[in-house]
Image (cartoon, helix red, strand yellow):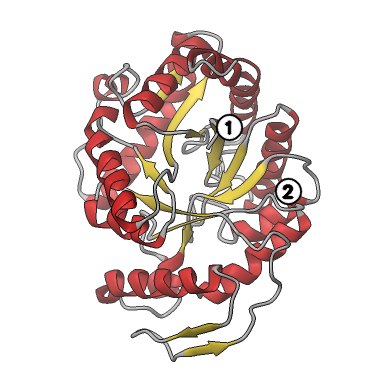
Amino acid sequence: MDLQLGLDTFGDIALDRDGQPLPAATVVREVLAEGQLADSLGIDVFGVGEHHRPDYAVSAPDTLLAGLATTTERIRLGTSVTVLSSDDPIRVFERFSTVDALSHGRAEITVGRGSFVESFPLFGLDLQDYEVLFSDKLDLLAHVLREEPVRWQGSTRPPVEVDRIMPPTESGHLPTWVGVGGTPASVVRAARYGMPIVIAIIGGATAQFAPLADLYRRACEEAGHPGLPVAVHSPGHVAETDEQAAQEYLPYFVEQMHKLGAERGWPPMTEAQARQQLTPEGAVYCGSPETVARKIATTLRTLGATRFQLKYSNGRLPHDLRMSSIRLYGEQVVPRVRELMGEA
């Protein structure tokens, strides 16, 4: 797989000039503009995540991607992630094959369990079934993705016997990735299905994930699927200088980490801890174009990855700073990474 450099967003809700949360509809339209800018800059991939909570505006990424499909020309359109555990695999295929038609073959899916669990009670699911739901639904999706007659039986829904799922894709192939954290079982399962993985690195040093990437490649060889790509998803922000990027990004990053920490019982993050994440060993890709490009190139080499997706939205970081970051990423970071990786 050729080197691909992309962007991810969850549609994080920022504040208006009066300090009030923006309407979700405004944020959805902002994400549309951000995807259109990414396309105009030649960025390879634009991913939109699914959440069901008030700090994110996007709960139906496929619908937003359908809008982008008709207003962009070349950028690949995907998710980061589709929460498969609380969805129906057949409906997932139907929606994304429709996006694929609208975009002339540019749609893809990244499925995962997600980092939040709000969708489980929302859709009447039991959290005790967390593991079995994902395992069962991934198996059904793998059958559906073959675009052949489906004869499937699992444990979480009635059997499926259907000759065709509509609409089929024009190419007969809908690219589908599996989003993984640090669980060896997750990468082995993805390898067994012949699906590429996106490693979400949101904390810790990149080198800590190298054994996971190596395990995935070994599992792919054993399963008869050699050469499948590995991607990385990590947060960050690009500005003209390292200090400007830190000053713009850190207040929103720390605020978001405090919020999540309060929900999950983590201790508050200090500014020193936050700045540590911006160092070459940290998980946040924040700095000047040269700093971010070098860090991305190091990550790609360390993990043997061929795709990097920068999660450019974070907490209440406003739209104008996100747009500026996207522009610098497309105009300076992407070509510099390609140069560093010998693909200029």
Numbered marks: total: 2
Of label 2 and label 1, which has the lower sequence position? 2
Give the camera-side residue of 13 and 49: 49
Q: Residue at x 48, y 50 (%)?
A: 55
Q: Quadrant of the C terminus?
A: top right
Q: Secondary structure at mark 2?
A: helix
Residue 21: % across, % down: 56, 45
| Amino acid at dot 2 | Leu
Residue 73 appears in which quarter of the rendering? top right
Position of residue 222 relative to residue 304, above or below, is below
Identity of the residue drawn at 40% across and 87% down:
153
**Numbered disc in front, either 2 or 1:** 2
- Callout 1 environment at 10 Å: few (<14), some (14 to 19), or many (20+)? many
**Residue 301's disc number:** none
Mark 2 vs mark 1, CA separation in Å: 21 Å
Residue 230 spot, x, y in % from top left: 41, 41
Kindly identify the residue that appears in the image at 44 percent across and 73 percent down.
122
Q: Nearer the viewer, residue 1 or 115?
A: 1
Q: Is residue 104 above or below residue 136?
A: above
Q: Nearer the viewer, residue 185 or 324?
A: 185
Instruction: State which quadrant residue 233 falls in.
Output: top left
Q: Secondary structure at mark 1?
A: loop
Q: Which residue is mark 2?
A: 68
Please tell me how crowded label 2 is: few (under 14), some (14-19), or many (20+) other residues with Cα within 10 Å: many
Q: Amino acid at mark 1?
A: Pro
Left or right: 247, with 175 as reference point: left
Residue at 70% x, 44% y is 32
Q: Position of residue 277 (x, y in %)?
A: 31, 24
Q: Which residue is mark 1?
A: 318
